[in-house]
Structure formats: C-alpha cells, structure tokens
C-alpha cells in the first residue's frame, strides 16, 4: 500500500492549549504510524503579526517540546522549523505569481482577522494562504489535517496546484491534496463561553486548559467552568442547545473512550458537580503528564536543537528535489 504524505504545522505564538491538542496534535501521533508525516513549527506564519523575537524563539522550542511530549516520534516523523527550510519562502513567491487576487480576496479568515482594520494589517496576513500552499506542495503532500477554519485554505491550495499544472501543461506535477480526516472532532470552545473558540488570546486564563497547567490548575478551571442552571438533559438534541455543556461533553469524549451519549446517559438528571469532578480526573490523567514532559524538555534546549536540526536536514533534502524541478519548469537558470 502506498503511504500518504501528510503535512501539518503549529504556530509558535504562545501557550498551547487543549484546543491545539484535541484539534490537531493528539491525532498526529496516530497518523505517523501509517503515513509519511512532516510536522513543522510554522514560524514564518507567526510573524504575519509582530512577535517579540525572544518570545518567538522560546515558543518555537515549546511547540517542538509539545510535539515530542504528545507522542510524535522523530524517527517515524520529520519535526522541523519552517523558516530553516528556505524552499517554503521560495516556492511561496512562485505560487504568489500563480494565485489570483480574486482568490485571496475571498478568504474569509483574512476578513475575520483583519476586521475593520484591513488597510493596516501586514500584506503577509493577506498572502498567508499562498505560504500555506507552499508548505504543502513543497513536499507534494497528499493529505493535510484541517479544521473547519482551514478548509477554505486547502481548497485554495488545490486551485493553485491545478493552475500551476495547467499553466505548464504538467497535469500530474503537483498532487491535489485531500483533507485528512482521522475522526470527527468538534471545535474546542472557551470554558467561559461555549460560543467562542478556545484561544490563547482570551484575556481570562480560566477560559482554557493550557497543556502546561498542573493538576490543581486543571481542577480549578473545570470547577469554575460555565455549565447550566438545570441538570444534565436526557438527549443530544437538548445538549446542543446548551453550548457550554455541549463543549464540556465534547472535551470529555476527546480525552476518554466515552461517546457523547454514554456521558449523557451516565449523568442525566444530575447537577454538574459529579460530571465536573470526573472530567477533571480525566483531564489530569491525560494532560498533566504532557505538561510535565514539556517542562522537562524545555530544560534541555540542546536536545530540542538536535531534534530540529536533524528534522530540518531531512525536510530540506526532500524540498530541494521538488524545488529544483519547479525552477526548471518555470524557466529559472541555476548557476
């Protein structure tokens, strides 16, 4: 069986939280067993908004440590730092010249992030999707794990790949990457507002479970999390009308083998104290060891440097083969 080539990345923009884990990193460790996987720290994407240089360096180490702590094996997978493989930026420029302005203008995430201030945001934020396309196509990745907020970007990548293939009359040069769907994962929402995505930018630390939170902090945050004034309802239909309760149930299913209906049946008609206690125990069992391992790895920067250096060399070797072909196709002369 031909293995899929899977690529994904995480931005080094601050504390990783439960949403990053359940929405992405948790499944990376599963994917690596049956696929050729590349997992990068996408620091080029991070600087579309200003980053303090020292903090960016520290965050890059932290994402690398989190990959390892969550079970990604640097022997099975390639873990690397995006900015250290120059092919990402080189291919992004070529793809910028392939991509149409109208395509980028339709990107809803740019509109959401720029808001009413679109004239003053960086041009990098506008062309972010073409860099994402370069990340994927540089390795001829066939599959990309994407959340609902990234599906449009993957569709754009497919459009860019198709146009490149058509323009240069090479119908099969770039594969048209497919979304990698391991399991239907509900978006992890804020612990304080079930209608808002869990985010490190939320001013309240009680809105999220950080991967480095210790046992006591996890228990305290779940205890203070918002639920409902009424007991646990009896059906999934009723739960969906209670966004905070629905969110906590989704989190519970994400860190255990329970289904949504299992939990509703178990806690039906009860107030939420027992539910929260059991959820806290499940989170402590799953998340606290990850935080301990991240903290341990962060004390050994030389080891993390070695992991990134070895991964970067592997990624660079793969990317240079594709980029050389692209240069020849486009008509660039290499001295």
Image (cartoon, helix red, strand yellow):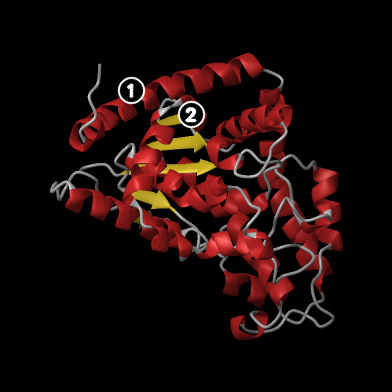
Which residue occupies the foreground of this view, 287 or 170? 170
| CA distance for labels 1 and 2 | 12 Å
Sooner in the amino-acid sequence: mark 1 or mark 2 = 2
Q: What element carries label 2?
A: strand
Which residue occupies the foreground of this view, 95 or 38? 95
Q: How many marks?
A: 2
Residue drawn at point x = 69 percent, y = 24 percent: 298
Residue on which disc 2 sits: 80
Quarter placement of the C terminus: top left
Residue on which disc 1 sits: 317
**Farthest residue, direction front:** 119
Residue drawn at point x = 16 percent, y = 48 percent: 172
Q: Where is residue 211 in the image (x, y as percent from the top left)?
A: 70, 43
Whether residue 213 is visible: yes
- Dot 1, how many residues are within 10 Å of its Cα: few (below 14), some (14-19), or many (20+)? few
State if disc 2 and disc 1 touch (CB < 8 Å). no
Residue drawn at point x = 36 percent, y = 57 percent: 100
Quarter placement of the N terminus: top left
Q: What element carries label 1?
A: helix
Residue drawn at point x = 29 percent, y = 41 percent: 140
Q: Position of residue 102 (x, y in %)?
A: 40, 63
Whether residue 81 is visible: no
């Amino acid at each position: 069986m031909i293995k899929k080539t899977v690529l994904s990345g995480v931005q080094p923009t601050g504390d990783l939280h439960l949403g990053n884990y359940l929405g992405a990193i948790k499944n990376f460790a599963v994917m690596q067993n049956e696929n050729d996987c590349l997992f990068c720290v996408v620091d080029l994407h991070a600087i579309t908004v200003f980053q303090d240089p020292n903090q960016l360096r520290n965050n890059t180490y932290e994402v690398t440590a989190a990959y390892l702590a969550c079970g990604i094996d640097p022997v099975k997978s390639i873990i690397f730092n995006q900015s250290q493989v120059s092919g990402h930026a080189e291919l992004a420029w070529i793809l910028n010249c392939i991509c149409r302005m109208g395509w980028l203008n339709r990107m809803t995430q740019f509109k959401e992030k720029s808001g009413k201030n679109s004239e003053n945001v960086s041009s990098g934020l506008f062309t972010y999707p073409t860099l994402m396309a370069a990340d994927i196509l540089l390795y001829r990745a066939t599959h990309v794990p994407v959340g609902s907020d990234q599906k449009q970007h993957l569709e754009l990548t497919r459009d860019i790949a198709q146009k490149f293939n058509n323009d240069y009359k090479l119908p099969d040069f770039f594969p048209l990457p497919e979304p990698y769907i391991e399991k239907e994962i509900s978006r992890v929402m804020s612990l304080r507002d079930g209608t808002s995505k869990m985010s490190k930018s939320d001013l309240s630390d009680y809105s999220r479970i950080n991967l480095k939170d210790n046992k006591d902090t996890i228990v305290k945050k779940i205890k203070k999390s918002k639920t409902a004034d009424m007991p646990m309802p009896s059906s999934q239909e009723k739960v969906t009308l209670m966004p905070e309760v629905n969110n906590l149930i989704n989190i519970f299913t994400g860190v255990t083998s329970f289904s949504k209906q299992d939990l509703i049946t178990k806690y039906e008609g009860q107030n939420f104290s027992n539910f929260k206690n059991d959820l806290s125990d499940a989170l402590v069992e799953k998340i606290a060891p990850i935080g301990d391992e991240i903290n341990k790895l962060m004390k050994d920067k030389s080891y993390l440097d070695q992991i990134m250096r070895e991964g970067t060399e592997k990624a660079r070797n793969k990317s240079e083969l594709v980029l050389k072909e692209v240069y020849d196709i486009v008509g660039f002369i290499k001295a």
